[in-house]
Image (spheres, rainbow, N blue to C red):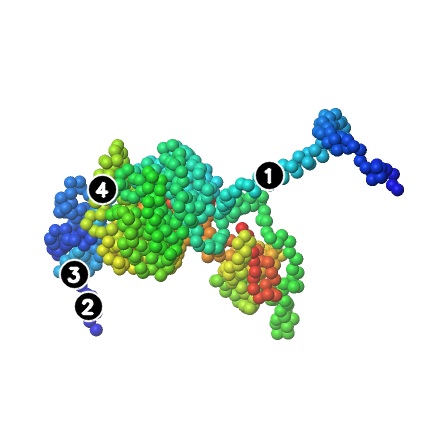
Amino acid sequence: MDTQPVLAPAIDASASVMCQLLSPEGDPLGAALYLPQNVGPPQLQEIVNQLLHNEEKLPYAFYVGDEELSIQLGAYMRQKNANVEVTLRIVCQPQALFRIRPVNRCSATIAGHTEAVIAVSFSPDGKSLASGSGDTTVRFWDLSTQTPLFTCKGHKNWVLCIAWSPDGKQLVSGSKSGELILWDPKTGNQLGTPLMGHRKWITAVSWEPVHLQSPCFRFVSASKDGDARIWDVTTRKCVISLTGHTSSVTCVKWGGDGLIYTGSQDCLIKVWETSQGKLVKTLKGHGHWVNSLALSTEYVLRTGAYDHTGKTFSTAEEMKEAALARYKKMRGNAPERLVSGSDDFTMFLWEPTISKQPKARMTGHQKLVNHVYFSPDGQWLASASFDKSVKLWNGITGKFVAAFRGHVADVYQISWSADSRLLLSGSKDSTLKIWDIRTRKLKMDLPGHADEVYTVDWSPDGEKVASGGKDRVLKLWMN
Amino acid sequence: MPQGDHIELHQKRHGKRLDHEERKRKREAREVHRRSKDARNLLGAKGKRFAQKCYAEKAQMKKTLKMHDESTKRQKVDDDVQEGALPPYLLDRDQTQRAKVLSNTIKQKRKEKAGKWDVPLPKVRPVAEEEMFKVLRTGKRKTKQWKRMVTKATFVGAGFTRKPPKYERFIRPTGLRFTKAHVTHPELKCTFNLDIISVKKNPNGPMYTSLGVMTRGTIIEVNVSELGLVTPAGKVVWGKYAQVTNNPENDGCINAVLLV
């Protein structure tokens, strides 16, 4: 009967909002503050910088709940009809100082391989590029002239995976016949004889981080025969063999605190310690093959001491210290997080150093998850699946954030830009797509490949993207 | 007794010559010199025949030597490098092949250059009008004969509304209307049930095309979005042409082959 319109609660222009600023892990940054209504993100940034006593003004992004706060506090409260009496909890996430521009054109299509390009990888300093292919060769490419540099022959069967050492001095490649060969990127020559030992093909290779050992001389390789082996480059021998899996080991990662994580087709993830090769933990939970592992500090371990400033190091000691500083900053106080993606359409978030139980289970994909990758700052996690979508998750809690749809066939691999603002995905439908994390939308579509795209990589300096696939050409993209 | 046996007969009767063995040995020793003399001096047809015989013997000797060599050595079996290299995450998976954009674009370009469509059924039996239409007699005395009913399969489209019955000349019965076709991909050899978007061309005439009649050899446009094809420019392909390969009015379904 009463048709009086409901009046919106009048918010006084001079009233203030009670806010509590939190760090991404949930720790409060100082006490709760009364902030006036017209405070927006730039002012909040200044406050946070002062609270943390930062020397440089670092950019921050602010999140309330899971939504980004991009307008002034007053407008936000009005929009959400939030209760003024409850303290507003604002999470501050540090952003990268530098901003990477999205690539939008294919600057070069370099032919050279005579069979499908299977693996492509930039060196940790972003200055060199290597690729492995089904024609049994590993090729090095010159980025400044965009032409081939060296063709390295030596493998007997398809080159399945390549990995740069974090100091950028060596490259190891594993093949379908189970052998590993080390190459010198400066001359293109083989360093010594092939390392034999595995009985079946190599599925993944990972180097020991440079902050634990510099110069790098150890790496671990995983194979279909079910064991992972730690090799020593200087003695050219297999130092330790990590056996225990009953089925093919699909991926292996050398963690920053000296633990090795292996994921296998027997649905288990095993954690090993590296001095004697003993099994520390077995993480159970998946119902089907574990396809991919990701560590929250992975990007820092991969790039070692190099970062966006482009500084070069003269001695191994310097490199080790710089890498250690970067690693400590990245990790903070939190333990290393591990995410595993599986054929059972779900992913688990683990904190292996703390407990055997998973921290979160991430469901939502409708087909198997092929590749999972943490963003370089560890805040986000992206997963590529054969259900044609890429999903974005919160890297700390494992909560679902957004789904990126656009591909029309299985999404094979993903790669992050160095500032964690852009995500690149390569798919079976022959296109690459760049997704913007802030707007949660498609930023750039990069068609051009004639056939399936098997591998993508974004250079650590953010300038270039390299992609290779079934059409046997290597494409370099720039903006 | 045959003519040439006198040598043997004498040897049987009186025994061999006393220096027989020595003469035989020396003769065989001289064979090498004789052979070499022949090789140097034989000319013409005889020379050719001799050379051929020598070569055949040499080849045979080489084969036997190689055979003997092989059994002493042990060779490592090299695994053949197969075609179709796959990344490690696809190696254990049995993936059904999907339509390739590569073959599509090259053939498209060739077709555009040639200027004509290369269809699987270039010639079809022409369908006469009496076979296509059935005459309907209308009117109070059933003397008017201007209405026709289509006897073949048709496609009318989603928003189709009939003309007022008094004025419609061509009747397309709902029983003969189809919306889906069984389209086979010629390279993958698998068949998909795809929606028809339109009838592009009926070889029997433009009138049948406009009516939407589908007979054998008709080019139809089908919705291929479920195949997940992408052009090199990055656009998703959602419609492609296909040619009808059966007689739908006899079978009750439309079978077509995709034109790639």
Q: Looking at the image, is mark 3 or mark 4 earlier in the sequence?
A: 3
Most foreground residue, A290 or B134: A290
The secondary structure type at the circle numbered 2 is loop
**Residue annotated with mark 4:** A324
Looking at the rendered image, the disc whose residue lies closer to the viewer, 4 or 1, is 1
Q: Looking at the image, is mark 3 or mark 2 earlier in the sequence?
A: 2
Tell me the kind of residue under disc 2.
Gln
Q: Position of residue A202 (x, y in %)?
A: 40, 47
Marks 1 and 3, how far apart in space? 95 Å
Q: Position of residue A420 (x, y in %)?
A: 28, 46
| Marks 1 and 2 close (CB-CB < 8 Å) | no
Left or right relative to A52: residue A433: right
Left or right relative to B41: residue A60: left
Q: Which mark is residue A4?
A: 2
Q: Is residue B47 above or below residue A265?
A: above
Marks 3 and 4, how far apart in space? 45 Å
Left or right relative to A95: residue A465: right
Tell me the kind of residue under disc 1.
Lys
Chain containing the residue with disc 1: B
Q: Are marks 3 and 2 on the same chain?
A: yes
Q: Which mark is residue A339?
A: none
The secondary structure type at the circle numbered 1 is helix
Q: For mark 1, does the 10 Å Cα neighbourhood hold few (<14), some (14 to 19), or many (20 or more) residues? A: few
**Residue annotated with mark 3:** A83
Residue at position x 12%, y 54% in the image: A32
Tell me the kind of residue under disc 4.
Leu
Most foreground residue, A354 or A275: A275
In the rendered view of the protein, which quadrant contains the N terminus of chain B? top right
Chain containing the residue with disc 3: A
| Marks 3 and 4 close (CB-CB < 8 Å) | no
